[in-house]
Image: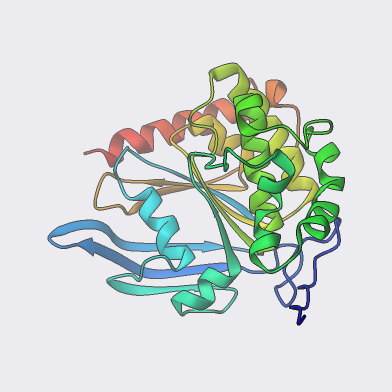
Amino acid sequence: MQTTPEAPVAEPHSISEPGAPNGGGAGIAIVGLAHRFGDLEAIERLELDVAPREVVGIVGPSGCGKSTLLELIAGLREPTAGGISVGGARGADERLSRCAYMPQRDLLLPWLPAIDNAALALRNRGARRDAARQATAPLFERFGLAGFERSRPAELSGGMRQRVAFLRTLMAGKPVLLLDEPFASLDALTRGEMQEWLAAALAAEPRTIVLVTHDVEEALYLSDRVFVLSARPARAVVELAVPAPRARPRAAVITSPGFAAGRQRALAALTEGKR
């Protein structure tokens, strides 16, 4: 009987896709971006750049086009005007090959155990189940999921489900991660814990990140820079640099004078952008 050769599986501690820039070595450049849905202008004249391994937060009013921006970066849509490049690639298919997209809902498959949900990207690349599990299992302890490898999604807390979803996104091996409101469905306490966890996870597994969130504190805590967008059609109102390094204790950071000043500036820009 003829068999299909098994696709290579990345090593547990180096989970970039073969042929992709390792460790987040792909930047993003957006120039003169505009997008329309028929007569509805969603984005206008947007200029944005993300350096390799940088985390950029995007905040803005509801419905301003934040999720559309991620879809455009990922190559799921083509812009009406302007250009987008990811690691130098401009075509939609090439951009998509460099990006892993994590939507707001975890979208875990309810019939699969956590380890198979996390390893789904490897299976989609042709890896057999045992090989995909072997590559994924060492990361469960690092992600605070040890002992839950065989648990179904319904048996996991909301925070644990989000960790599995993020691990699945990482296991795709892409240099660019696009995170769309990853903690929006969580309660305030769990959300704060997950923000601190994600900061540590990004320090351990660096990638180029674009994080969309409506939570100004979340953006300032997790990002190197934050862009505030206006109401639709979206345009950049202000860019905020975040001086403190990531993966620091959240409680100390969000109560610091510098963080408070950044939060006030971001909130003022949001108010201005709604006009």
Above or below, 70 against 9 in this view is above
Q: Specify the quadrant that holds the C terminus.
A: top left
Q: Can the viewer see residue 2?
A: yes
Residue 8 at what x, y percent from top left? 80, 72
Snapshot quadrant of residue 83: bottom left
Instruction: Residue at the far left: name it.
Output: 39
Q: Residue, x 66% and y 50% (percent of image)?
A: 168
Front-most of residues 108 and 84: 108
Q: Residue, x 41% and y 31% (percent of image)?
A: 267
Above or below, 187 against 117 in this view is above
Instruction: Residue at the far bottom: name it.
Output: 2
Q: Residue, x 76% and y 33% (percent of image)?
A: 248
Q: Specify the quadrant that holds the N terminus.
A: bottom right
Front-most of residues 189 and 160: 160
Q: Residue, x 70% and y 31% (percent of image)?
A: 196
Front-most of residues 5 and 97: 5
Q: Would you say 127 lies left or right of 238 here?
A: right
Residue 89 at what x, y percent from top left? 54, 79
Residue 110 at what x, y percent from top left? 57, 38
Above or below, 157 against 275 in this view is above
